[in-house]
Amino acid sequence: MLGLNRPELSQLMEEMGEAPFRAQQLLDAVYRQKVESVDQISTLSQELRAKLAEKNVSVGFPRIDKRFVSQDGTVRYLIEFSDGQSVETVWMPEGDGGESGDGTEAGESSAMRSTARQWDRATICISSQVGCAVDCQFCLTALLGVKRNLTAGEIVGQVCAVLKDQKVSPPQDRINLVFMGMGEPFLNYDNFIKAVRLLVEEVGVAESRMTVSTAGIVPRIHDFGQEPVRPKLAISLNASNDRQRTELMPLNRKWNLEKLMAAAREFPLRNRERITFEYVLLHGVNDSSDNAREVAELLRGMRAKVNLIALNPGPGIRFSTPEEERVAAFQQTLIKAGIPAFVRRPRGRDIYAACGQLKRTVEIASAPVS
Ligand code: SAH
């Protein structure tokens, strides 16, 4: 049932000869209460629960296979689905300063900070595919190749599993969602959009608290702009000219900077909305002041901001991380050119949970919890 929307659950109940109000009970049980089995849906009669079991209707709640807890509070979850495939989902108390789902920068508002816990907002980073086909040269997920798309239920299921594990629920708790985990969301577009709707309508996360990142699937950027319900848009830029971008992100051959920037410029922004451009800084490769000036040129006149990410290293990645001063200098060049630029702080690097490190790594120094 996870992944089914209101009309689909209504139809299921109708087919089973049940009253229409049952659909609401199922939605509440699955998406609000986050039951893990039909047995746990106490609002249904024993008889109906048995009938569902007979029809092989299950909840489809994913299993948390492992948890890795970072020194900084980040938790990397290995989440397993019914066919045994798994993805990673990351819980970041206080986020990483880049998501700003409500339009403020993380850490700006702490007036409502609860004394009971250490965060007043948290961000969940969600995967959209098992592995990834895009082959960015600095990203560990690329090494897996793509195994399959996730269903809408599996995308929403990651969120439900983490919310339940952390004992929080939106909208009472301030939760931001970023579609920035394993996979390319715009290569699994329909399931991604269906998941977004379920997350907004049934789980209770506002669209303004969600951001999706794409490596630059240009036709889908156009489609995305037409969606009546949509997260904010982030684009992984990562290079300042075509030669360099093609080297780092082979998809640039198909959708080069001219096409990408045209799509970004045409993208219909809402009130006060900006497009985020992510830029991974690789030591001695794309981190010079010339590169920064080229980025400023690309973004001139746009309602945009740049999130800078110093490379998170990993085995099999041939690049290295620039020094902090170099990152700061790059940021200053952008700011001087009038482009808002932020440096994202790495979260959970010690447990391979940071950007570009999601590879279902189980062989790490610190032992998994539980
Ligand atoms: N496939 C989508 C969603 C993933 S977002 C996309 O590419 O946008 C993951 C972000 O992490 C991207 O902005 C990517 O550029 C960045 N990233 C990838 N590998 C990284 C690494 N090793 N260090 C730091 N950031 C990295």
Image: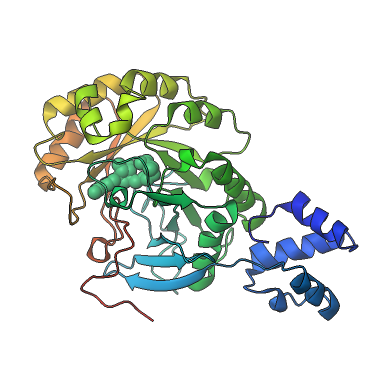
Question: Which x, y percent locates residue 340?
Answer: 30, 33
Q: Quadrant of ligand 1?
A: top left
173 horizontally vs 263: left or right: right
Q: Nearer the viewer, residue 241 or 334?
A: 241
- Left or right of 351 on screen, residue 110: right
The location of residue 166, given as percent across then percent down, is: 48, 71
Residue 283 quadrant = top left
Residue 197 against residue 287 in the figure, above or below: below
Split into 4 quadrants, where in the image is the N terminus? bottom right
The residue at 23%/70% (across/down) is 364
| Residue at x 25% of width, y 24% of height | 296
Up the image or down, 228 lies above or below 114; here it is above
Colour convention: rainbow
Foreground: 38 or 262?
38
Of the pair 145 and 325, the residue shown nearer to us:
145
Location of residue 70 with respect to 171 vertically, above or below? below
* Residue 101 seen by the camera: yes
Residue 7 coordinates in the image, percent (x, y): 77, 49
Q: Describe residue 10's horizontal placement relative to residue 34 as left or right.
A: right
Q: Quadrant of residue 250?
A: top left
The residue lying at 39 percent from left, 81 percent from top is 370
